[in-house]
């Protein structure tokens, strides 16, 4: 997706907040947790996770909201677009894929918090689904839920 010399760029809906990062993403994933759903007002959030040292806001300053003791989420103060998820537990910035200037260039490779997935929403892919997080865990399944 990313050439080390060419920055990947993105922005909020109104364009007040712009960002760029360099290098390949660390991971690209779908998250089904309740807090991500509430932050995006959608059934799933898809993230492009990048090295914090290789990321910067190039225009504007988003509004920060501490959604839990170790997580800060940001959004545009003008249009409300969510922009980032940052945990103080790691050195990455998770960008909402829809804010990328070219979101089609990024493809998710797995799902997390699949145990919180809404029963009426399914993404039809064969990617692994992890009940909670991926680190140190085996997927609960690959692909969508079986049809009952």
Image: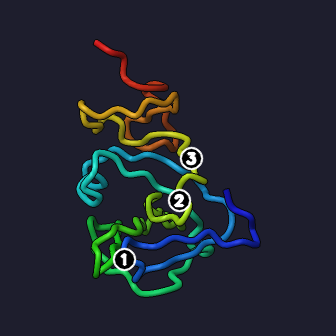
> x, y percentage for residue 97?
47, 58
At mark 2, the secondary structure is strand
Quadrant housing the C terminus: top left
In three-dimensional space, the C-alpha distance between marks 3 and 1, rounded to whole angstroms, equals: 24 Å
Q: Looking at this view, is 131 or 147 the one in front?
A: 147
Q: Earlier in the sequence, mark 3 or mark 2?
A: 2
Residue at horizontal 33%, vertical 77%?
76
> x, y percentage for residue 88?
43, 69
Cβ atoms at labels 3 and 2 below 8 Å apart = no
Q: Looking at this view, is 129 or 60 the one in front?
A: 60
> x, y percentage for residue 35?
26, 55
The residue indicated by pointer 1 is: 14
Q: Earlier in the sequence, mark 2 or mark 1?
A: 1
In three-dimensional space, the C-alpha distance between marks 2 and 1, rounded to whole angstroms, equals: 22 Å
Q: How would you rate the neighbour count of disc 1 (Cα within 10 Å): few for under 14, some for 14-19, many for 20 or more?
A: few
Q: Quadrant of residue 21?
A: bottom right
Foreground label between 2 and 1: 1
The residue indicated by pointer 2 is: 49
> x, y percentage for residue 117?
29, 37
Please give the label number shown on residue 107.
Answer: 3
In three-dimensional space, the C-alpha distance between marks 3 and 2, rounded to whole angstroms, equals: 12 Å
Q: Is residue 39 left or right of residue 21?
A: left
Residue at horizontal 49%, vertical 47%?
29
């Amino acid at each position: 997706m990313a050439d080390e010399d060419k920055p990947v760029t993105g922005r909020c809906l109104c364009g007040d907040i712009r960002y760029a990062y360099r290098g390949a993403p660390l991971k690209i994933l779908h998250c089904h947790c309740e807090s991500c759903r509430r932050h995006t007002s959608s059934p799933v959030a898809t993230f492009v996770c990048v090295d914090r040292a290789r990321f910067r806001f190039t225009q504007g300053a988003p509004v920060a909201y501490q959604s839990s003791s170790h997580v800060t989420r940001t959004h545009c103060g003008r249009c409300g677009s969510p922009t980032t998820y940052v945990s103080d537990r790691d050195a990455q910035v998770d960008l909402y894929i829809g804010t990328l200037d070219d979101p089609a260039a990024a493809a998710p490779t797995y799902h997390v918090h699949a145990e919180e997935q809404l029963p009426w929403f399914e993404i039809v892919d064969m990617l692994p689904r992890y009940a909670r997080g991926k680190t140190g865990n085996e997927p609960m399944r690959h692909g969508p839920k079986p049809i009952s």
